[in-house]
Image (spheres, rainbow, N blue to C red):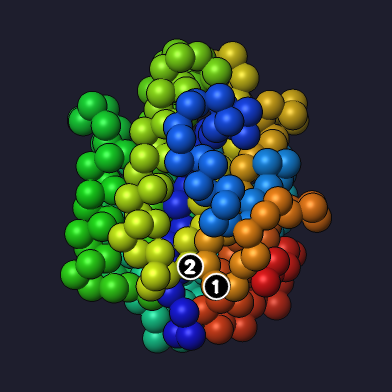
């Protein structure tokens, strides 16, 4: 692999919620990263279809997963985990929502850790601890850290833009800070959301559900706001470009590098 990548997904994080959460590290992120506050999710704006699109760079209508239940693709497209494995690379995954394991094909992960979001006061923080420990010990080529509490304990339990929702975003950004400070000299780091939300739900085409923030940290990116349109389909091709992997022919998105 030419370079290593850490991908961080913060479930259900709206751009306006990120700006309002009060975490002072956001200004630092803006100074370090290429970023967008107007990127697009997928329709339906639901966690599993969105993450499958993010890792496979095709729309839900193409991969066929339209709910939070995995179904085999009718015409399979290789995702970023499989591409890395085929090139001899090592991937790891740390996640707080069990169904998400199916975004990586069996055998494509060397390391994985799942912690139920309701087993800990801050599952996201415990998962970040484990991700940091594992990356320090093994230095995988690609690491995926997924934080779920913004969505589960914030949005669904208390409502999007509630005080608890904003608090969970701030906790997630504290965890992002720890990852960047520990590995920013060794990894490119992408921070994203899969979808937003409204009231206590998501899945619609409302702007509150469909608009997401994206941040790209590393030597391949120029700090500042990105003017061109971005979506979840840009994620896998950008990771492949950084790592020196040929993108899958059927991927619909393009690298921003």
Task: Find numbered disc 2 in the image and state the secondary structure of the residue it sits on.
Answer: strand
Q: Position of residue 191 (x, y in %)?
A: 51, 51
Question: Is residue 198 positioned above or below 82 on the image?
Answer: above
| Mark pair 1, 2: CA separation | 7 Å
Which residue occupies 26% across, 57% down? 132
Q: Is residue 222 visible?
A: yes
Q: Quadrant of residue 98?
A: top left
Circle 2 Cα neighbour tier, 10 Å, few/some/many (<14 / 14–19 / ≥20): many
Q: Residues within 10 Å of mark 1 (few under 14, many from 20)?
A: few
| Residue of label 2 | 188
Q: Nearer the viewer, residue 207 or 86?
A: 207
Q: Nearer the viewer, residue 46 or 185?
A: 185
Residue under the point 22% across and 63% down: 134
Q: Is residue 30 left or right of residue 189?
A: right
Residue 170 x/y as whole percent: 42, 31
Left or right of residue 29, residue 235 in this image: right
Residue beneath label 1, please?
219
Residue depicted at x 27% and y 56%: 131
Relative image position of residue 228 (x, y in whole percent): 80, 55
Q: Is residue 138 left or right of residue 248?
A: left
| SS label for mark 1 | loop
Is the residue under label 2 in contact with that under label 1 (CB below 8 Å)? yes
Of residues 11 and 191, which is closer to you in this image? 191
Q: Quadrant of residue 154?
A: top left
Q: Residue at x 61, y 83 (%)?
A: 246
């Amino acid at each position: 692999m030419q370079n290593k990548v850490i991908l961080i997904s913060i479930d259900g994080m709206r751009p306006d919620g990120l700006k309002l959460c009060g975490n002072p590290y956001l200004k630092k992120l803006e100074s370090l990263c290429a970023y967008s506050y107007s990127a697009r999710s997928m329709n339906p704006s639901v966690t599993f279809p969105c993450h499958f699109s993010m890792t496979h760079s095709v729309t839900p209508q193409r991969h066929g997963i339209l709910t939070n239940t995995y179904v085999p693709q009718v015409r399979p497209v290789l995702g970023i985990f499989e591409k890395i494995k085929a090139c001899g690379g090592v991937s790891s995954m740390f996640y707080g929502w069990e169904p998400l394991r199916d975004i990586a094909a069996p055998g494509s992960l060397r390391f994985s850790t799942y912690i139920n979001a309701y087993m800990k006061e801050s599952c996201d923080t415990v998962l970040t601890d484990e991700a940091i420990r594992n990356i320090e010990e093994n230095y995988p080529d690609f690491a995926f850290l997924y934080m779920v509490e913004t969505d589960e304990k914030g949005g669904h339990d208390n409502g999007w833009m509630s005080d608890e929702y904003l608090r969970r975003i701030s906790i997630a950004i504290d965890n992002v800070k720890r990852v960047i400070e520990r590995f920013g000299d060794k990894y490119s780091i992408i921070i994203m959301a899969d979808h937003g939300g409204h009231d206590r739900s998501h899945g619609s085409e409302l702007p509150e559900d469909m608009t997401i923030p994206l941040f790209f940290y590393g030597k391949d990116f120029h700090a500042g706001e990105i003017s061109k349109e971005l979506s979840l389909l840009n994620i896998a091709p950008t990771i492949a470009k950084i790592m020196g992997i040929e993108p899958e022919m059927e991927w619909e998105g393009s690298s921003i590098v």
